[in-house]
Image (cartoon, grey):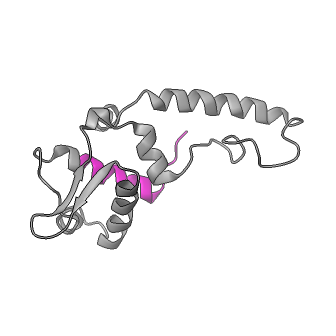
Amino acid sequence: MLNLSANGDYGLLLLKELSLAQPGQYLSLATLARTKHLPRKYLDHVARQLVTAGVISAREGRGGGYILSKPVNQIKFVEVLKALEGELEPVHCTHDGKCCDRKFACERKTGWQEVHAQLYKLLQNKTLADVIKTAA
């Protein structure tokens, strides 16, 4: 049901690599880009989004790079998805219900709102550790 964009794919890869680093060790995006054959500029963009969301922290200079802001089992997966993909919604109008004037007459909408609520509830209970463990 979730179709991740390149943003999501690169972001999850970055987070997985950060989770594998030694405690206190910052990861250089240049190194990650080189070893994983990924575009550095795109990784910079994704890293900035994750910093803004408070998922990772950055340090400049020698020995700098990126590090997880908190332990991987304390990072909610829904936070990561929102930072990388935007608001979670199976169809455009399910998030806030303000997409059109027919919201009360649309029978499909009621079904999608329920799907959205269930999906969001499921994802709220997952941490990044759950997802990395599943993907490993």
* Residue 90 counted in the magenta span: no
Q: State the image coordinates of residue 61 (x, y, percent, origin top left).
A: 14, 70
* Residue 15 counted in the magenta span: yes
The residue sitting at 41% across, 45% down in the picture is 80
Q: Main secondary structure of the magenta part?
A: helix
Q: Is residue 70 left or right of residue 79?
A: left
The residue sitting at 34% across, 73% down in the picture is 41
The residue sitting at 38% across, 66% down in the picture is 45
* Placement of the C terminus among the 4 image quadrants: top left
Q: Is residue 28 left or right of residue 111?
A: left
Question: Measured along the vertical axis of the image, is residue 51 above or below residue 44?
Answer: above
Q: State the image coordinates of residue 129 (x, y, percent, origin top left).
A: 29, 34
Q: Nearer the viewer, residue 135 or 16?
A: 16
Q: State the image coordinates of residue 36 (x, y, percent, origin top left).
A: 23, 61
Residue 4 appearing in the image? no
Q: Where does the magenta region start and end?
A: 1-17
Q: State the image coordinates of residue 126 (x, y, percent, origin top left).
A: 40, 30
Query: Most extreme residue toward the bottom, as rendered?
Result: 41
Q: Is residue 98 left or right of residue 44?
A: right
Q: Nearer the viewer, residue 18 or 1?
A: 18
The residue sitting at 88% across, 43% down in the picture is 102
Residue 72 appearing in the image? yes
* Placement of the N terminus among the 4 image quadrants: top right
